Structure formats: C-alpha cells, structure tokens
C-alpha cells in the first residue's frame, strides 16, 4: 500500500514568527541557544514532510472497516513511544478518497496535538490518522527514530507550545515553525540505536509478561472453570496430564445450586475464603498525614500497569495517616480490585500497601492463594459487574462482593495449581522489575543523548556494563 499524494496538506495558516524554546532539541522558531559541536538547528519541515489526518464521515458506514489502519487517540495513548502495526479502527480506500485522510508510509512519526497532547507513535506499516495528529515523513537527512526520541524528550515543552481554553492544542502555525537540533545522520542513527535497544528489551519483557499471564489464565480456566480434566476422565478420555496430576481430579461432576461441580469440591463464598477489606483517604487538608514512607494506592496506580503486579504507588502517607485507615497496612501478596470508576483494575501488591476507598482488597490467609484469588477474580468479572450498583457510578461494595460463589477444589489440587502458577507470577514480577530499571535508564540517557551532553560511545560503554 503506497502513500498517497506527494504534497503536504496541513491548512493554510503560515508558520508563526515567534519563538518558544523547548527543553533539549526542539523549539518553535529558531532558538538563541547554540547547537553542540557538530550539530545544527534546522526547520523540521526542511528535513521531514509535515502531514496531518482526518476522520472519514461516521455517517457513511461503508467508509469504515477495511485494510487501512487508522490511528486515533486511543491507539496513541495505549502505545506511547512504540511502533504500532495495527489499530483499533480501520478505514478503506473509499473512506480515504472521500475525506482529507491520507495513507502515510511506514516509519512516519506521529504526535497527538489536541485533546491529549504529546503522545508519540511510529507507523509500523502504511496507515492513516485522525486530525488529532501531526505527522512527519522523514527525508534522508532525518532518522525517524531520532525524531521519535526528540519528541519523547520534549513532553513537558508541548504544554508551552499549546494553547486553548476548552482543551490544549498545538496549532499548525507553531508546528510549522518547529526547529530541531540535528547531529550527523550517522550519529542520529547511533543515538536511536542506543535508546531503541533499551525499548526493545522493554518490549520483549512486556510480551513475555503477557504470555505468562495468558498461560496462568488458561490453566485456571481449564481446571476451575471448564473442569477439563474432570470431564475428560468422566468421558473416558485422556486428560493430557501426567499420571500424578490426573489422579488428583475426580471422575465425575455433580449437580449443585451453582451448576455442575467436580465431585468432592466445595461451593463456598469468596468472603469466607479470603479476608475482604477496603480502605479510605486520610484528610488531604492535614499535611501531617502525607508525604511519608508508607505506600498508599488508588485505582489510578493500577490503571497504567502493564501486568498484574503493583510495585509502587504515586503517593505515600505517614504513620499518622495510616492510623486513619481502618484496614491498616496490607501485606505483600494482597489482591487489589478497583471497585469503582471503573470496576476491574486488578493486581497483586508486591509491596506492603494501604489503599483508598476505591478498592476491594483480598488478603489471602486461608486455603486459597493470592494467585488463585487473582485468576478467580478475572474469570468472574462479569458476575462482579452484575452485582455492582450505584446511581452516579457503578460500584461493587464489599457486602455485595463477599457472597459471590467460589468453587474450592481439594487441597492437593490447589497445591498442584499454586506451584506452577506462583512460578509464572514470579517471572511476571521479575520482568516488570527489570522493565522499570530499563525504563529509568532510558529516561536518564534520553535527554543527555538528545541534547548532545552525552556522546554515543560513552552511552554504549555504559550499556555494555549493565545489559
């Protein structure tokens, strides 16, 4: 699929003549700052073709669905800093032909300029975007990875470049006046390689965590939702398990008020198997409660997690603040479920943590492990949502959560399950810890490399020691 049109179409207003300096290597207008030795300031439009996008009419369903990926804001927020190869929505040649949307080539660098300003993605194949983006098709003088990292390093500057009363927008006169500080093409590629090496390792970890979580969920579903080993034995089939595991499962299902259940397993209530608690918020008007050493979680801390492990919180409280929370400090291994706005964020706390009122927290002190409770919660999310109520927003209260039924296997089955799944979860946590270390290293190197303060050879030497 080739890019359509050679000319730029970005609106008629010319570039602003003012100057708004960025942080490192980007500026609206030509800045007064000198470039590092061997670098030069140049207009971005001199080394990249500026493009925008458009939304084909929603009144024409025939414009939607097809083989043209179409980048919207949700695609950018979910993939910030990444190369994307597919999108939530797709348009087609008819939608492109009847709108101002344009199919742009792979390696086009995209920046969200309105609604949610500052998200950066790179096209992994030819795509179109909405009008919420400005896009650059790089000329041979500009490495697309270098441009991506320049934009990522200037996140705080974008708010200075933007304006607007209802919501912030970077308008085209400012975008057209972007200037970028460039080293040689060889050094651009080298800088991009150093930073991309870290991002590639982070991406490998992310995919590994996703795979490990999928394995854990599949095992839980097979054993405790579909009862596959029991059904296989009852039908005279091989369950596909080693003999010592096959022997742990009964050979028939029995009818209960909750449907068929493996013989010898019990139907209980989740509130009888784990300790279900909530939390609260110490008064924000009392500074004595805040900025201490005790982790204090809100659902927002879970909203940005890549995997099911909470390693840190954005806010901390003091011991005086903790005294205001009835559930106190919850232990490592507590399963956290956001109970409102929205319901469904889920993680296992890998740190001692206190929580606000937006959680159902499960402390697993009995026969059900935290990994069992975590996967049970995922598998029963529909039932949890059905038991939520509320006029302003839906909430699952602790009193509505505790009676939810849980099928409890025999102890030997639980033990056989917990061993491998705890191992899977431990590997997920290890991947997440390494990812955070790599991301911190990348974020340290990024401004130094982009500004020319750190040379590539020094960065490569450092990476050789830590990777």
Image: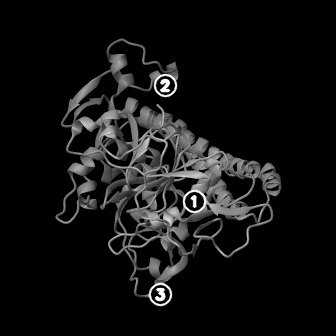
Q: Is residue 305 left or right of residue 269?
A: right
User: Does the rendering let one see residue 315?
Assistant: no
The image position of residue 262, as x and y in percent, is 31, 29
In the rendered image of this protein, does residue 142 appear above or below residue 92? below
Q: Is residue 444 left or right of residue 351?
A: right
- Can you identify the residue that label 1 sits on? 151
Mark sitting on residue 287: 3
| Residue appearing at x 45%, y 49% in the figure | 370
Q: Residue furthest top?
A: 236
User: Does the rendering let one see residue 294?
Assistant: yes
Q: Are marks 1 and 2 in contact (CB under 8 Å)?
A: no
Distance between mark 1 and mark 2 Cα atoms: 54 Å
Dot 2 falls on a residue whose secondary structure is helix
Q: Are marks 3 and 2 in contact (CB under 8 Å)?
A: no
Classify residue 181 by image quadrant.
bottom right
Category of crowding for the residue at label 2, using alpha-carbon neighbours closer than 10 angstroms: few (below 14), some (14–19), many (at least 20):
some
Mark sitting on residue 387: none
Classify residue 46 by image quadrant.
bottom right
Q: Is residue 311 left or right of residue 34?
A: left
Category of crowding for the residue at label 3, using alpha-carbon neighbours closer than 10 angstroms: few (below 14), some (14–19), many (at least 20):
few
Closer to us: mark 1 or mark 2?
1
- Can you identify the residue that label 2 sits on? 245
The image position of residue 312, as x and y in percent, is 54, 63
Dot 3 falls on a residue whose secondary structure is helix
| Residue appearing at x 58%, y 51% in the figure | 48
User: Could you tell which of marks 1 and 2 lies nearer the N-terminus?
Assistant: 1
User: Could you tell which of marks 1 and 3 lies nearer the N-terminus?
Assistant: 1
The image position of residue 309, as x and y in percent, is 51, 53
In the rendered image of this protein, does residue 79 appear above or below residue 248? below
Nearer to us in this view, 299 or 152:
152
In the rendered image of this protein, does residue 326 appear above or below residue 384? below
The image position of residue 131, as x and y in percent, is 37, 54
């Amino acid at each position: 699929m080739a890019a359509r049109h050679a000319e730029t179409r970005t609106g008629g207003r010319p570039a602003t003549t003012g100057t708004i300096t960025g942080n490192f290597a980007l500026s609206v207008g030509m800045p007064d700052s000198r470039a590092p030795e061997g670098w030069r300031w140049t207009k971005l439009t001199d080394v990249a073709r500026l493009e925008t996008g458009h939304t084909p009419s929603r009144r024409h369903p025939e414009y939607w669905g097809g083989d043209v990926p179409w980048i919207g804001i949700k695609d950018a927020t979910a993939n910030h800093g990444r190369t994307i190869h597919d999108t939530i929505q797709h348009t087609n040649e008819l939608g492109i032909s009847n709108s101002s949307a344009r199919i742009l080539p792979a390696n086009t660098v995209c920046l969200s300029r309105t609604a949610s300003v500052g998200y950066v993605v790179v096209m992994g194949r030819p795509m179109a975007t909405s009008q919420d983006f400005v896009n650059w098709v790089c000329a041979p003088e500009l490495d697309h990875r270098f441009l991506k990292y320049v934009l990522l390093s200037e996140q705080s500057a974008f708010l200075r470049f933007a304006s607007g009363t209802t919501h912030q927008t970077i308008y085209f006169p400012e975008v057209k006046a972007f200037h970028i500080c460039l080293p040689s093409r060889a050094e651009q590629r080298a800088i991009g390689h150093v930073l991309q090496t870290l991002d590639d390792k982070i991406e490998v970890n992310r995919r590994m965590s996703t795979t490990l979580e999928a394995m854990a969920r599949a095992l839980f579903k097979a054993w405790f939702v579909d009862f596959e080993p029991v059904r296989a034995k009852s039908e005279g089939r091989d369950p596909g398990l080693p003999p010592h595991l096959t022997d742990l499962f009964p050979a028939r299902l029995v009818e209960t008020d909750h449907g068929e259940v493996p013989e010898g397993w019990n139907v209980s209530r989740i509130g009888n198997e784990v300790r279900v608690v909530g939390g609260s918020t110490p008064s924000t008007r009392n500074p004595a409660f805040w900025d201490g050493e005790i982790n204090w979680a809100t659902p927002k801390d879970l909203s940005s997690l890549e995997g099911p492990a909470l390693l840190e919180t954005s806010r901390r409280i003091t011991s005086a603040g903790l005294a205001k929370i009835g559930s106190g400090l919850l232990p490592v291994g507590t399963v956290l479920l956001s109970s409102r706005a929205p319901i469904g964020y889920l993680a296992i706390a890998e740190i001692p943590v206190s929580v606000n009122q937006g959680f159902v927290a499960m402390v697993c002190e009995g026969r059900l492990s935290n990994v069992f409770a975590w996967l049970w919660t995922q598998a029963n999310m529909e039932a949890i949502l059905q038991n939520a109520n509320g006029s302003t927003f839906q909430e699952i209260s602790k009193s509505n959560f505790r009676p939810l039924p849980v099928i409890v296997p025999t102890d030997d089955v639980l033990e056989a399950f917990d061993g491998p799944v705890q191992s899977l979860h431990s590997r997920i946590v290890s991947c997440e810890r390494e990812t955070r270390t790599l991301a911190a290293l990348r974020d340290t190197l990024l401004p130094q490399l982009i500004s020319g303060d750190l040379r590539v050879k020094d960065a490569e030497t450092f990476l050789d020691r830590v990777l």
